[in-house]
Every structure is written in C-alpha cells, then in structure tokens.
Amino acid sequence: MNLSEEQKAAVARWVGEGASVADVQKRLGEEYSLRPTYMDVRFLIDDLELTLADKPAPKEPPPAPPPADSGAKTAGHDGTMHSDTAETELIDDGAAPGGGGKVAVTIDKITKPGSLVSGAVTFGDGNKAQWFLDQMGRLALNPSTPGYKPSQADVMAFQRELQSIIEQQGGMF
C-alpha cells in the first residue's frame, strides 16, 4: 500500500495513541477514503516499525461460589471419618478489628449429618458463615464469602455466644 508521508505520520500518531489495527483501518477509510484490508494495515504497521499497544487482559469472571456445606463425612483408608468440606481457620491475627456489630449465633433445628451440633453465625461486620462441631470437638467454619476470615474479636465473641447458647440448651449435644 502506498501512502503519502502525511498519511504515514497519521498512522504512526494513531498507533502511538493506542489505536488497534481495526481502528487504523477504519480511520484510513474515514479520513483518507482508503479501503485497505486488515492484513494490509497490519503489514503497513510492521513496515513503519510501529508497535501496537498491549490490550488490557480480559477480566476473568469471578469464581463460582463453593457448594453449600453438606457436612457429609466419608471414611478414609484408615477407617476414620473425614469431612468432605475443608475446615477454615477461625482466627486471622492480621484482620482488622470486628465491624463493631454484635455477633449473632443460631443453632440448626436439624443438625448437619456427622455433626454434634451445627448452625449459622453473622459476624459484627455483617459477613455470615455456617459452622458445625464434630464428634472430636473440632469447630469448623464455612464462610459465605470465599476467603473471608473473621477478626479475632469476632471469633472470640462467636465462641462466647456459642458456649452460652449450648449451656442454655443444657449442653445436650
């Protein structure tokens, strides 16, 4: 493709401003009544030793939320029971202090299979989680927001509230 020096300068300016090959092709048609093919423009950009701006990386969709915690247990090779869901560490020393709100704990009317007791908690910052206590006395937390870790103050309030509720129920779990 033969372009005048003025047209080559315009192409260089457009590419310098971040125009894509398709943008240059369109502008050559609009401003100079030229109808080059996409490949013609691509070769022109290469011939002029111009570098196209990198396109921003496409945004990845957010990860799918984890499946609801069924609390299901499966037998391992050694015969011991293991949870199908990962347990979440309850204390995050690096977390900011609690959200200032009250921690609310509820106990499920129908306990999740494989648990002594289970329920839900809403932390002071409004984040929610499902929890359960297994036969070994281990407390597991499954937050609604993936990766969420409550503040140490909220965890302590949760444990106090849970203990209080269990004592009110007569500790019959």
Image: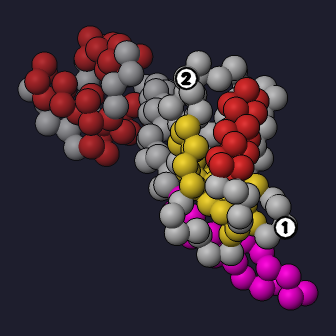
Q: Marks 2 and 1: CB-CB under 8 Å?
A: no
- The reply to whether residue 3 is visible in this rendering is yes
Residue type highlighted by circle 2: Gly
Q: Quadrant of residue 134?
A: bottom right
Q: Is residue 150 magenta?
A: no
- The reply to whether residue 85 is visible in this rendering is no
Q: Is residue 69 magenta?
A: yes
Within 10 Å of disc 2 (Cα), the crowding (few <14, some 14-19, many 20+) is few
In the shown orientation, is residue 121 left or right of residue 53?
right
Question: Residue 113: x, y in percent?
Answer: 62, 75
Mark with earlier residue (2, 1): 2
Question: Residue 39: x, y in percent?
Answer: 31, 45
Q: Quadrant of residue 94?
A: top right
Within 10 Å of disc 1 (Cα), the crowding (few <14, some 14-19, many 20+) is few
Disc 2/disc 1 C-alpha distance (Å):
31 Å
Start-end of magenta stretch: 66-85
Q: Residue at x 26, y 30 (%)?
A: 23
In this picture the colour scheme is secondary structure
Residue type highlighted by circle 1: Met
- Look at the magenta stretch and give its main secondary structure: loop
* Residue behind mark 2: 101
Q: Residue at x 57, y 64 (%)?
A: 69
Q: Which mark is residue 136?
A: 1
Q: How many marks?
A: 2
Question: Residue 129: x, y in percent?
Answer: 57, 47
Up-down relation of residue 117 to residue 83 (above or below) = above
Which quadrant would the C terminus be assigned to in this image?
A: bottom right
Up-down relation of residue 147 to residue 111 (above or below) = above
Question: Residue 169: x, y in percent?
Answer: 64, 55
Comparing 60 with 33, the one in front is: 60
At numbered mark 1, what does the secondary structure look like: helix, strand or loop? loop
At numbered mark 2, what does the secondary structure look like: helix, strand or loop? loop
